[in-house]
Image (cartoon, helix red, strand yellow):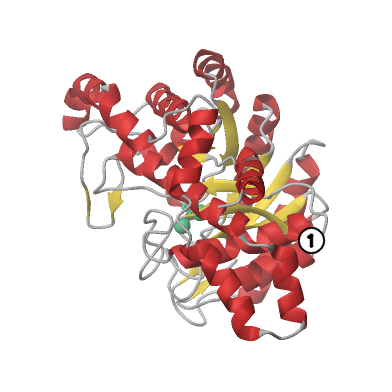
Amino acid sequence: MSSATDEKVFAALNEFFIEIPSWGFANTGTRFGKFQQAAAASTIEEKFADAAEVHRLTGVTPTLALHVLWDLPNGVSDVANIQKLESATGIRPGSINPNLFQDAEYKFGSICNPDPKVREQALAHLIDSVEIGKALRSAEVSLWIADGSNYPGSQSIRRRIDWMKEVLRATHKALGPDQIMLVEYKPFEPAFYHTDIADWGMAMELSRDAGPQARVLVDTGHHYQSTNIEQIVAWLLSCNQLGGFHFNDRKYADDDLTIGSIDPYQVFRIFSELLVEKTLRGGKSFPAFMIDQSHNLKGKMEAMVQTVCTAQELFAKAALIDQEKLAGLQDSCSLVEAEELFRGAFWTDVRPLVREWRVARGLSADPLAALRESGYMEKITAERKEKNAKGQSSYA
Ligand code: PSV
Ligand code: MN
Ligand code: MN
């Protein structure tokens, strides 16, 4: 590899940061059951400690996404505790994720519920989440709306659009100048007939309608099979509506598997679109990169470190693409040459270069090996096993 290419990849890696989710450290499961892991985090203190360890090892995860109900169950009153943890660990609170899907009153929806009182309650929670974000100086408020219905004719899709627009406009009004409201979409689950925000078109319309500080959040697991996600990314970039990503991989539905474990080429193609924006179209910054995974079989610490390293490697591969040369080949319709250039970057083993980049920053060349050697997992297993055996968790 030439040193100019090395420098290009190093420069790209210097700009690569990815947020990790608090819920990725907690005991989760499937709808069939929960497998308790002895080392899982069950308190916000433990989640911050685990996040700090991932950041110490990888150097690229300075922020932790927070889920309001799970991490700040008392809402704004819990802000002081989060600030204390921020000072103690150096990990900054990341995106604030309101929770409008768990409480019994949301059985028939939250911001789309036919009952105006429930919609009001949902709006109050969204505004609380915005206030939490302000107090914590966190930029993103990430909205995933689980609303939908299970049977045709059982709900008015049309009226629910109006209700949703009203609430999202009101939420946008509450934003501070440095905040951004992200609208996430998902085609199904928990609802199985219609979901109120099912795809990027709906999310973009809602985001545009809500106001200038709203954007779309793309969760890679929230599409039908074979959807061309990089094309959605290109469109959102073109419309200046891309706000962030929830990265994960899947084989079947919203499986929340490790990034790139099933289809690494897809992540590479998404990163390539983002790098085109940056290198050829004057893009100033990347949208927010966030992980949205919860592992119920893999150890949580190992899964998180493995995820971050994989994301970095796929980003480095995409940074190898000579985008100017590729644009020339595309213009001359040199199909095979263009494809080979693209594919060639994907098949290049960048791991030695990423290791070099880590060492140059005083990090361990192999964060996963460093985690295993650090004794951290043994320590948290010993500290937490009794509590976890009793089945306590942040979901309790
Ligand atoms: C829903 O499937 C989702 O992707 C949303 O982003 C939630 O906030 C997250 O998972 C955790 O439940
Ligand atoms: Mn998500
Ligand atoms: Mn999801």
Corner quadrant of residue 216: bottom right
| Image position of 85 (left or right of 207) | left
Task: Tell me residue 41's x, y (percent).
Answer: 33, 30
Corner quadrant of residue 235: bottom right
Structural crowding at the residue carrying mark 1, measured as other residues with C-alpha within 10 Å and reported as few (<14), some (14–19) or many (≥20):
few
| Image position of 346 (left or right of 162) | left
Query: Compared to 27, does 361 lie above or below?
Result: above
Q: Nearer the viewer, residue 274 or 34?
A: 274
Does residue 390 show up? no
Q: Secondary structure at mark 1?
A: helix
Image point (53%, 76%), residue name: 227
Image point (53%, 71%), residue name: 343
Does residue 224 show up? yes
Query: Compared to 129, does 163 lie above or below?
Result: below
Q: Nearer the viewer, residue 52 or 107?
A: 52
Image point (23%, 19%), residue name: 383
The C terminus, quarter of image: top left
| Image position of 363 (left or right of 137) | left
Q: How many marks?
A: 1
Task: Tell me residue 276's x, y (percent).
Answer: 72, 62
Q: Which residue is mark 1?
A: 280
